Image: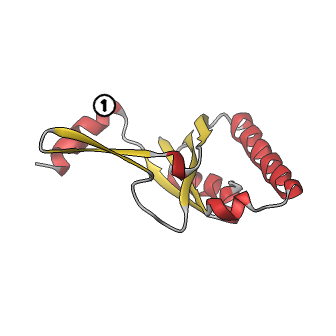
Amino acid sequence: MQYILTIYANEAGFAGMPKEAVEQAMASYGAYNDALNKAKVFVAGERLRPASTASTVRMLDGKSKVQDGPYAETKEQLGGFYIIDVPDLDAALKWAAKCPGAHHGIVEVRAIWSADEGRGDVKRAYS
């Protein structure tokens, strides 16, 4: 089953880190990436640009409204994600605990609906 691990942290804190600490953090993410690949559970993952570069889009009265900035102003911002393919939630939680993001922020773990199962589940959930 696939799970998304979303990494939330305070961007301001990361931006103020000394160069050596940033290099160490990047090295720990590199090692984590290697471990995910070696275990053959890595599906996708990316680091996101700062939340200040985000745009939000919503439909109001049939027209799209675009706003600069993130959807919500929070202490922690979404900084990146991994998608992993593991047998169950317990395995996903173990990988989340190993993620460097869990040491300087929060890692949220959520199951991903596959295209096939999602159709039926969405119909049941909203009918």
Residue 67 appears in the picture as rendered: yes
| Apparent side of residue 54 relative to residue 11 in the rendered image (left or right) | left
- The answer to which of 91 and 66 lies nearer the viewer is 66
**Residue underneath mark 1:** 116
Horizontal and vertical percent position of residue 90: 55, 56
Horizontal and vertical percent position of residue 59: 21, 43
Q: Residues within 10 Å of mark 1 (few under 14, many from 20)?
A: few
| Apparent side of residue 14 relative to residue 82 in the rendered image (left or right) | right
Residue 6 appears in the picture as rendered: no
Kindly identify the residue that appears in the image at 75 percent across and 42 percent down: 35
Horizontal and vertical percent position of residue 84: 56, 41
Counting every numbered tag in the picture gives: 1
Height in image: 105 above or below 82? below
| Apparent side of residue 4 relative to residue 22 in the rendered image (left or right) | left
Q: Residue furthest bottom?
A: 75
Horizontal and vertical percent position of residue 68: 42, 48
Q: Residue furthest top?
A: 116
Q: Please identify the quarter of the rendering in which residue 48 is found.
A: top right
- The answer to which of 102 and 121 lies nearer the viewer is 102
Height in image: 39 above or below 97? above
Give the amino acid at mark 1.
Answer: Asp
Height in image: 107 above or below 88? below
- The answer to which of 67 and 118 lies nearer the viewer is 67
